[in-house]
Image (cartoon, grey):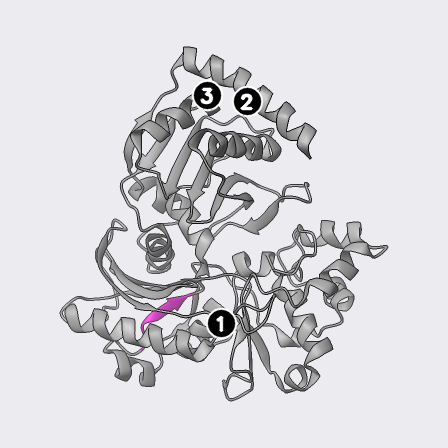
Amino acid sequence: MDLDAAPVDPIAIAVEVGTNAARAAIIGPAAQLLDVTEVPLESHSPSPGRVEQDPERWWAATIACLQELVSRNHTTRVDALAVGAQLHAIVPIDQDGRCLVRRVGLWNDERSAPLAAGLAAGPDAERLSQLAGNRPDPIRSGIKLAWYRAESPTVYDAAWQFLATKDFLNYRLTGVAATDPTEASGSFCMDAESGKWSDELFAALGISGSKVPPIIGSTEICGRLRPEVAGATGLPVGLPVVGGAGDILCQLAAAGLHHTERAVEIGQRDLTLVGTYSDIPHPSPTVLNYRAAGSGWVHLRWVPTPAGQERECFEVRRMLDELGPTRLRTLRVVGANAADPSWNQLRAAVHGLPVVTLRATEGRLIGAGILALVGAGAYVSVGAAADAVVTEASRVFPDPDRADAYDEAYEQFLRTTSSLS
């Protein structure tokens, strides 16, 4: 692959490292997926509450994906690379870049739960939650870092940096340690108003701010591909690598969630997530707030995917009501069951909103690709890129009579579930 100084119709490489697989893709100038490779990943749960993966396996799988991708597309020019990866896992590394543990806890690892509960019960819990834009809970990477200080002080003391999954991979790619606002905003260490690390939050956690990297923009160039990585993969030396974002924020960017009048529903195997957008964090303690991959804030709610289409639609409507009061005009659906026409007719009736499906289905890779394309200069912003490249596959409008009937059914659902809680 070649690297041009002044790209025309830039081509990007997107890397995604989730809990189940590492993938790499070539993304065209209109954010179209041109080719993709995948290597499976394995999680380990050696005891209740522990969910772990091996960071070296992330790196090996990423290299394997890039090698195969380049071998199949060796004549393709590439202009930038972005990584989107699972949120909240942190890797302690020393000053030589070596991992100091064999495996790290993932977002759903619960070993930091007692620390999070202590913070939530403390006298300054409300102040700290307002400062961070989120409540303290075990998923937060800052609280996981505090767990290392409390339970594994030798590792904590030896660590030069604690890097999130994406940031660890970017460091291996470029030799530069940095993070981005999507990761930082979910750490319980960032001041939500200023977008900078907070000394007050570091002090509350009992950790040193020197253990975390600087925050840069998701589309800002983090560094350039090291010669050793270029030699191993066939990518060009000096390829720009942008800051990237958490995987779910990449998916929401690819779904065009940068308008206050738009919501996105993401169907997964076990979870249903709903996201809305605004300029500030949501005040509710039940909402997960993240900086969007471009600008503004994404508000997320989730529930375990319930049995039955109607029940799931009612749960999504309840989450949207909690995320209000913005007047929504459309609901975009991606992921599991997004292409089911009958389910989308039901969604439209329950929500009283047009339900939109998208042509592109690989949102996490495409979202990372959008970040790389913006970094390469193809678009002025993530929002502008999404407006230009995200296209609808279908739009289902609510049937008025059916919508009225479901308004009554939804109110009955709320009364029933309220009496059971």
**Residue 124 in the image, given as x and y percentages of width and height:** 83, 55
* Residue at point 58%, 61% (across, down): 184
Q: Are marks 1 and 2 in contact (CB under 8 Å)?
A: no
**Residue 409 in the image, given as x and y percentages of width and height:** 53, 19
Q: Are marks 1 and 3 in contact (CB under 8 Å)?
A: no
Q: Main secondary structure of the magenta part?
A: strand
**Residue 82 in the image, given as x and y percentages of width and height:** 37, 63
Q: Quadrant of residue 163?
A: bottom right
The first of marks 1 and 3 along the sequence is: 1
Q: Nearer the viewer, mark 1 or mark 3?
A: 1
Q: Quadrant of residue 302?
A: top right
Q: Which residue is mark 2?
A: 410
Relative to residue 201, is residue 337 depicted above or below? above
Per the image, is 240 magenta?
yes
Foreground of the two, 413 or 4: 413
Foreground of the two, 364 or 225: 364
Mark carried by residue 94: none
Relative to residue 272, is residue 371 depicted above or below? below
**Residue 336 in the image, given as x and y percentages of width and height:** 37, 44
Q: Label 3: how many residues lie within 10 Å, few (<14), some (14-19) or many (20+)?
A: many
What are the residue bounds of the magenta stretch?
A: 238-242
- Secondary structure under badge 3? loop
Which quadrant: the C terminus? top right
**Spatial distance from mark 1 to mark 2, Cα to Cα?**
40 Å
Q: Which residue is mark 3?
A: 352
Mark carried by residue 44: 1
Residue 321 shows up from this direction:
yes
**Farthest-out residue, top:** 401
- Secondary structure under badge 1? loop
